[in-house]
Amino acid sequence: MDWVTCTHSAACTGIARRPYGLCLSHLHPDDLTATLAGMAPGRLLDLRGTAIGGDLLTRVVEATGRRPGRARFDRVRFTGDVRLADVTFAGDVSLDGALFERLASFFGSRFEGNVSLAGARFARELSFHGVEVRGHLALDRAVMARDALFSQAGFGHGLSCEGARFDGFATFDGARLGDGATFRGARFGRTLSFRKVRGGALFEAAHFAADAYLSATGRLSAARARADGTLDVSVSDGSADLRRVEVAGATTLRLADARADLEGAVLRGPATVTGRGRSALTSLRQVDAPSLTLHGLDLSACGFAGLVHPAGVRLTECRFGMSARGVREGVRAPVMRWLSRRSAPAPQQPGPQAAGPPPSPSGVRSP
């Protein structure tokens, strides 16, 4: 720890308050009152390592006029409910390694700067519903043991949840992601609802232990991700990278003026890819999908080499480079004929030996 700790006991990690040498939670009531009186809106609030109950937190928030400045809550242990509705943090907020033993609700709060919750642990529910973060929010390696709500939240400079663990239901419905969201290596223990989200998102190498419903505008990547249940993905005006994804349940991919790459994907359940507008599928190379339906897609640049179950591919309203009208009838036959034409060897031209002896000058073939 890079701060002077409380002298109350060797076990207390709270930052010592001058001139008392004790952390906020161990101050004498009169000294606590004097310390709170010295707080003001917009000023630095440093409570690193301190154990804070619900009543003490309320007094601190009120002492800052519900508008603290730069706030440092690293390794703070919140022993009571954290309810910070309608609080505005005027500066960056650091909660790295903090422990929330009960409810953590930031509903309606506003953060003017960046927020870091790296390595934080939430034993109960976490709510960022409707929160506005003008900067960047980091939840890297955080552990959320119960439900985590981020619906209708706004993140001006994006969201990072690399290596985070969501053990409960998680929702980001209607969130605005600014510079995008990263969930690389994250684990979702229950259903993930990521619907009607504005902005790009990366779920590379993530593990969805239950159903996952993902949407994005721009780029969405779930490359090398694993889904133990249903995987439902919607992408508009961008691209979907699903290379080497593994899905045990049903897979649904909806594209609107977007491109998708499924190279190396393993789709054990029924899979459907549909497209609207200028939507295209760029690769089905080495895809293992016993049942795959493609509809409304541009397949003129799609690679099929190594497709494990070509007979399981069904096409409707798809377009190939050879046909302006597209494939409008037939179910399995079109893709099989297309693959056959692609893989058939070129016809050999007869060599000089097969042409026979040259004719004689008189036009009569020599015996």
Image (cartoon, rainbow, N blue to C red):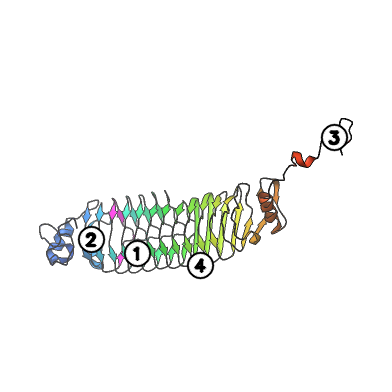
- Foreground: 176 or 226? 226
Image location (x, y in percent) of residue 109 = 34, 57
Q: Which of marks 3 and 4 is nearer the N terminus?
A: 4
Q: In the rendered structure, which amino acid carries the disc numbered 3?
A: Pro
**Distance CA(mark 3)–CA(mark 4):** 74 Å
**Residue matched to label 1:** 143
Q: Residue 229 carries which label?
A: 4
Q: Which of marks 2 and 1 is nearer the N terminus?
A: 2
In the rendered view, tell whether residue 84 sits above or below residue 326: below
Magenta-colored span: 79-97
Q: Earlier in the sequence, mark 2 or mark 4?
A: 2
Image location (x, y in percent) of residue 232 = 53, 61
Image location (x, y in percent) of residue 19 = 10, 57
Q: Quarter-wise, where is residue 81 in the image?
A: bottom left
Image location (x, y in percent) of residue 146 = 38, 69
**Distance CA(mark 2)–CA(mark 3):** 109 Å
Badge 1 density bin: few <14, some 14–19, many ≥20, Cα 10 Å: many
